[in-house]
Image (spheres, helix red, strand yellow):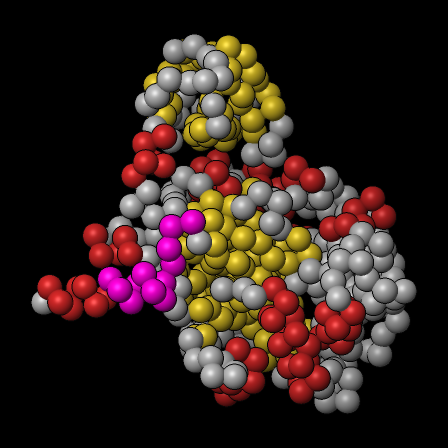
Amino acid sequence: MKRFFIIIAFLLISWGVGAQDTITVMQYNLLQYGNYNSGFADCYETNNNTQRKDECIRTLLDYVKPDIFTVCEFGKPQQLQSDFLKHNLNTNGIDYWKSDNIVNYANSSIINHIFYDSRKMELKKHVALRTSPRDTDVYELYLKTSSLLSGDTIKLVCIVAHPKAGMNYEADRRATMQTAMDYINQHYQNDNVLIMGDFNMYRASESGYRLLTQTYSNSNVLFVDPLANQGGVGEWNSNSSFAPFHTQSTRRWSDECFSSGGLDDRFDFILMSDEIYMGFNKLKYVNNSYFAVGNDGRHFDQSINQNGNSAVPDIVAEALFDGSDHLPVTMKMKVYGNWDVEEMALDAMRVYPNPTDGIIHIETGRATSQQEFRITNVMGQVLMKGQIAQTIDVSGLPAGIYFIQIDGITRKFVKN
């Protein structure tokens, strides 16, 4: 038995995720992949050829090298999933990419899906939430780290949503997000959670976006937009000020299947729980790692490959042009295992009571070299700063989630 655990430990260390490793996530709307003439769009073999799309997808996967690949607008046949794995992921001797059986309560012609590197993680659970016009899919994964041997599981929940498109369907999009947020509130209040997909949202003032990031009744489950500190949040529809953040459309002119108009909307997202944003549960967002693949900020209302592309090689720009009318979005997370004893000791800091009605007490596990504190909101805006003290009065802050940073150490607290 002892020898068995030694072998398992060796395999986890050799093939799994180690301390300070990173997990790369990519979300992509595949534009009616394998779904011809569904009545939803005029997409046929002639103008949305699956073989050409596969060539494009392989190019993008080789460029980004994701560990988790989530998609929207994937055709519903189960065989399509097997073919996708065979032609795009498990190629050239690779055999470690996995997915899950398709669940499709809404009986939609296009669905969400996930593919993941089984050397680094395993899928524990897949739940399809009944939303309209498509299910919203919840995937609960755990990372294969050596800390599993001591019973320490690093959990990652990926929720893929694709609410209804169109200017007149804001209420429908909000209803989809309400279902997702209620489920998170019930099952994953303090977990590492990503919510991603083609949200079809035209501006940050949309009620669905605000529900995700600001207005949901339990502030503990609000999401952080990684572009909030980079100017990517606002009225992004047809607004050249948001050119570096747009994800749709890749073509100026179209052929009935692909949307036209060039890049002018931010529809595609990966939002994260503050547990990931700040690294509270051994997964931490790598700062500035979030971007829309191929967006160089110079193609507002233009095709993604028009007059060259300074963000990606030409072959990648051509793959983005031919593969879909959306750009993929991607981000990275750093992994911290429970064997990082020294690192965890350095991060010892306690903030209480939490939640608080007005006063927080600070205890640190080491002497601070910088006797200052900063308090920020989920958007990264500094609201308070000053000399460190054992108690800090935050009664002037509105109710919500905040972060206090002292000497490079950050803790979350909730103000009632």
Horizontally, residue 153 falls left or right of residue 276, namely left
> Residue 172 is drawn in which quadrant?
bottom right
Q: Residue 215 or 258: which is nearer the viewer? A: 258
Q: Nearer the viewer, residue 317 or 366?
A: 366
Q: Nearer the viewer, residue 209 or 145?
A: 145
Residue 53 locus on image (x, y percent): 68, 80
Quadrant location of the C terminus in the rendered image? top left
- The answer to whether residue 243 is seen in the rendering is yes
Identify the residue shown where x is 73% and y is 82%. 48
Q: Which residues are magenta?
A: 9-20
User: Disc count in the image?
Assistant: 0
Q: Position of residue 60 (x, y in %)?
A: 65, 70
349 displayed left or right of 324? left
Is 45 rendered above or below residue 236?
below
Q: Is residue 11 magenta?
A: yes
Q: Is residue 383 above or below residue 289?
A: above
